[in-house]
Image (tube, rainbow, N blue to C red):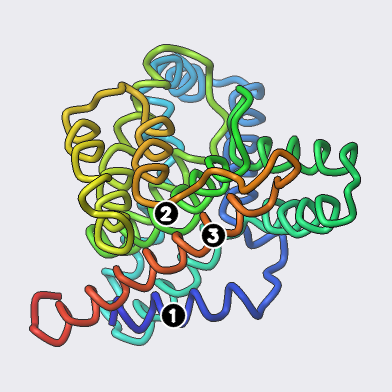
């Protein structure tokens, strides 16, 4: 069932435009806004909830309540069809990154036309979609977007079902306080997807060159998932531009690598499903 849900969700994501109101990010933000309004109304219970939510654990637990409720209802009904439909919808709602796709297409068009100003602006849009504040090359940003919006939801759906994909997307998209604890939480939830996704790079890229880099990343060196992803991708594939004015070849090469990598894991999941391991 999981394999069919993943295949259907990825197919629909390419062909169906989902209303913004159905994006999981919008649902999570509405939930947080509703809770903030309830807290402002006062009351002893709301004050206790507000105090509890001052801590990161309380904020996280309160944010993932919609994911818990949806999962509980699905388990309570205990219907194969409902689980399948909700699984597909959950994947669809969590994989929405239309802004990044639109910016990437505009980036390629501007680069091919030689419009440096428009190219730089679209690169900023891609950086914003990736959630990366520091300057980074476009191929690293595309790999990070793919990890957060495609591969990690797939992995957490395979491992933990509907709750896994919804909980991950909640922690990815929710409004949060900027703190060391939050940064550590993001490192934790993206650590496993980063290492598994980059392991796929070994299988579909330059295994001998990328293996030492991947082993170093498993030892958590560097202490940064974005850097680990970038380093393994650069080792697995030739990402240097052909000449100084070439700003699209690395992006196209990275997208091709990501597609091969995703296909590898889908085939692997299919083999494991046939073998009865899922």
* Residue wearing tag 2: 166
Could you say whether the residue bearing mark 1 is in a helix, strand or loop? helix
Query: Does residue 156 show up?
Result: no
* Corner quadrant of residue 35: top right
Image coordinates for residue 136, horizontal then vertical, percent = 59, 30
Comparing 28 with 99, the one in front is: 99
* 163 vs 39: above or below: below
* Residue under numbered circle 1: 85
Alpha-carbon span between mark 3 and mark 1: 29 Å
The residues tagged by marks 2 and 1 sit, at their Cα atoms, a distance apart of 14 Å
> Does label 2 or label 3 sit earlier along the sequence?
2
- Rounded to the nearest angstrom, the CA distance separating label 2 from label 3 is 25 Å
**Closer to the camera in the image, 49 or 272:** 272
Q: Position of residue 4 (x, y in %)?
A: 35, 84
**Tag 2 secondary structure:** helix
Report which residue position mark 3 lands on: 255
Label 2 CA crowd tier, 10 Å (few <14, some 14–19, many 20+): many
């Amino acid at each position: 069932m999981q394999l069919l849900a993943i295949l259907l969700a990825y197919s629909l994501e390419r062909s169906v435009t989902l209303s913004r109101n159905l994006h999981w990010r919008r649902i999570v933000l509405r939930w947080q806004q509703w809770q903030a309004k309830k807290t402002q109304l006062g009351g002893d219970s709301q004050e206790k909830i507000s105090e509890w939510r001052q801590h990161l654990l309380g904020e996280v637990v309160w944010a993932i309540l919609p994911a818990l409720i949806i999962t509980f209802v699905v388990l309570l009904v205990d219907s194969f069809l409902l689980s399948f439909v909700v699984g597909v919808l959950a994947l669809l709602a969590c994989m929405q990154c239309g802004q990044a796709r639109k910016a990437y297409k505009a980036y390629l068009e501007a680069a091919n036309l030689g419009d440096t100003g428009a190219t730089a602006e679209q690169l900023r849009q891609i950086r914003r979609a990736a959630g990366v504040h520091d300057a980074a090359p476009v191929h690293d940003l595309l790999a990070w977007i793919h990890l957060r919006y495609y591969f990690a939801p797939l992995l957490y759906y395979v491992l933990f079902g509907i709750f896994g994909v919804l909980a991950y997307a909640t922690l990815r998209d929710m409004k949060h306080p900027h703190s060391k604890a939050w940064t550590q939480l993001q490192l934790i939830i993206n650590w496993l997807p980063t290492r598994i996704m980059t392991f796929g790079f070994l299988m579909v890229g330059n295994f001998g060159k990328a293996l030492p880099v991947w082993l170093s990343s498993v030892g958590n060196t560097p202490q940064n998932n974005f850097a680990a992803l970038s380093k393994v991708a650069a080792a697995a594939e030739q990402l240097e531009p052909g000449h100084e004015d070439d700003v699209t070849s690395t992006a196209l090469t990275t997208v091709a690598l990501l597609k091969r990598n995703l296909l590898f894991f889908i085939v692997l999941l299919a083999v494991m499903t046939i073998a009865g391991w899922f």
